[in-house]
Image (cartoon, rainbow, N blue to C red):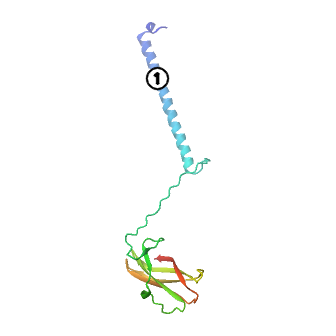
Amino acid sequence: MDETDKTPEEVIADYKEQQRLKGQKRLKIVIGVVVGLVVLSFIGNLTDNGTSSSSVTPAVTTTTPVYDDSWIPTGFNGYTEDDSIAWRWATKSEVDCTYSSGACWSIVLVAKEGCPSSLYGEVNIFDKNDVQISYTNDSVASVQPMQKVKLTFDTLDDSAQTANLSKLSCY
């Protein structure tokens, strides 16, 4: 039957049927796209949770912490394990070895925010061959912000020659 042989009602009915079929086709496409996105999202979640069998290694980004040395007084060194502590070896006139028969060393410290409970320090002790033979420690009670503090490290070991700072802790 030719389009010209159809009644106006038949032409309208054919047009409506074509529109209905187009609507169904569009709906199937939309449903297919939504199902595809859901599947991709599910696969992405599996990969993010580490359950994927993919051999691709995710990129690792590391950030280096910023060390704030703007507050450190002239002549002092920043303490790398805690950027709120600065220190320096005491001068000969600042060192007072009262009870050691071996050797002693002193350091002068400053804590940026202070230490409410105590300030603790350790040094490793070496003989003339640079062999570590011992350690010693010292501490002081609470320290005010930016207050200078002296810790003295004594040893009774006659073979002690040098020392190096091994630990500082602000509590």
Determine whether, in the image, residue 70 is placed left or right of residue 17: left
Residue 38 picture location, percent across and down? 52, 40
Write the residue at 43% across / 7% down: 4
Is residue 44 visible to the viewer in this orientation of the structure?
yes
Closer to us: 130 or 30: 130
State the residue in front, 159 or 85: 159
Closest to the observer: 18 or 109? 109
* Vertical side of 32 occupied by 21: above or below: above
Amino acid beneath label 1: Arg
What residue lies at 37% left-to-right and 69% top-to-bottom?
70
> Image quadrant for the C terminus?
bottom left
- x, y percentage for residue 106? 47, 84
Return the residue found at the far top: 5
Extreme-front residue of the structure: 129
Residue 126 at x, y percent in the picture = 57, 82
Q: Dot 1 lies on which element?
A: helix
Residue neighbourhood size for the residue with mark 1, other residues' Cα within 10 Å, grouped as few (<14), some (14–19), many (≥20): few
Q: Locate residue 147: give its quadrant.
A: bottom left
Q: Which residue is mark 1?
A: 20
